Image: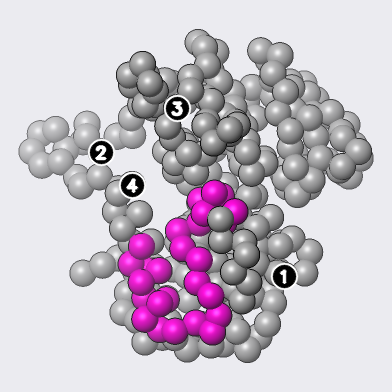
Amino acid sequence: MNPTLRILIADDELVARKRLTRLLAAFPDVTVCGEAADGEAVLEQVRAGGVDVVLLDIHMPGLSGMDALALLPAGGPQVIFVTAHADHAVEAFEHGAVDYVLKPVEASRLQKALERVRARLASRTPEPAKGPATEQAARPLARLPIPTRQGIVLVDPGTISHATLEDELVTVFTTQGDFLTDFTLQELVDRLPTEGFYRVHRRALLNLAHVTRLEPLETGGYLARTARGHTVEVSRQSARELRRMLGLRRGTEEDPGA
């Protein structure tokens, strides 16, 4: 028996939310845990917990679906875009979306998307070991294996300051050095601890523990400076989320390392 998937439906149109609720009611091992009419409400409900999957529209008031996806915490819920707009699919998959379903939604297509979610979740959840080693095997790995062209490098997640995507390749920056990897940014998000790591840009992942200063940009975003002297751009939407998390008013300049 499959574990129940707790699904948040996010669409600014009530009719669209009702249709998805009706379709999901026919599926076993699925429950609708909430609805959201905009991106801000999505983030609030995800922060509250109890969400495994978000069915996310692209165009919504305030934060768009793509903006909301970029602001979801590392290791957060899986995202299936449900939209009438086909032109954002490449960007959605680049951000780590599981699937991209076009409206009008058919039950068979939605079921296929949920099967993909279950497959991804199964690949992230190892089967429990049997025998005396069970307790040890259940513990998370203390070091993250990062595949590089020179072999697999075992890295303490706490030493990772940030990771960036350039020319379709990801570089992981650590206190021990920098590593070019075949991982995508979303694969790193899926494997890293949920606390401290934030997708601050569609091309950047940041560990706040290594940030010494956030410098405001004219765009409304920030330029994050790390202890090693690197800079990471924080998008306008991510900057808004960081200000909320750090308890800062808009325009306030604070050093998170102070």
The reply to whether dot 3 and dot 1 touch (C-beta < 8 Å) is no
Q: Is residue 101 magenta?
A: yes
Which tag, 2 or 4, sits closer to the chain's start? Answer: 4
Q: Amino acid at mark 3?
A: Thr
The residue under label 1 is 60
Q: Is residue 73 above or below residue 113?
A: above
Q: Is residue 30 above or below residue 41?
A: below
Q: Quadrant of the C terminus?
A: top right
Task: Report the disc number at residue 124.
Answer: 4
Query: Which residue does the image show at 69% across and 77% down from the upper left?
Result: 12
Q: Is residue 203 left or right of residue 189?
A: right
**Classed neighbour count for the residue bearing mark 1: other residues with Cα under 10 Å, few (<14), some (14–19), many (≥20):** some
The reply to whether dot 1 and dot 2 touch (C-beta < 8 Å) is no
Q: How far is mark 1 from mark 2, CA to CA?
A: 40 Å
Q: Which residues are magenta?
A: 91-116
Determine the secondary structure under disc 2: helix
The residue under label 2 is 138
Q: Amino acid at mark 4?
A: Arg
Q: How far is mark 4 from mark 1, CA to CA?
A: 30 Å
The residue under label 3 is 181
Nearest to the observer: residue 35 or residue 82:
82
**Classed neighbour count for the residue bearing mark 2: other residues with Cα under 10 Å, few (<14), some (14–19), many (≥20):** few
Q: How far is mark 3 from mark 1, CA to CA?
A: 34 Å
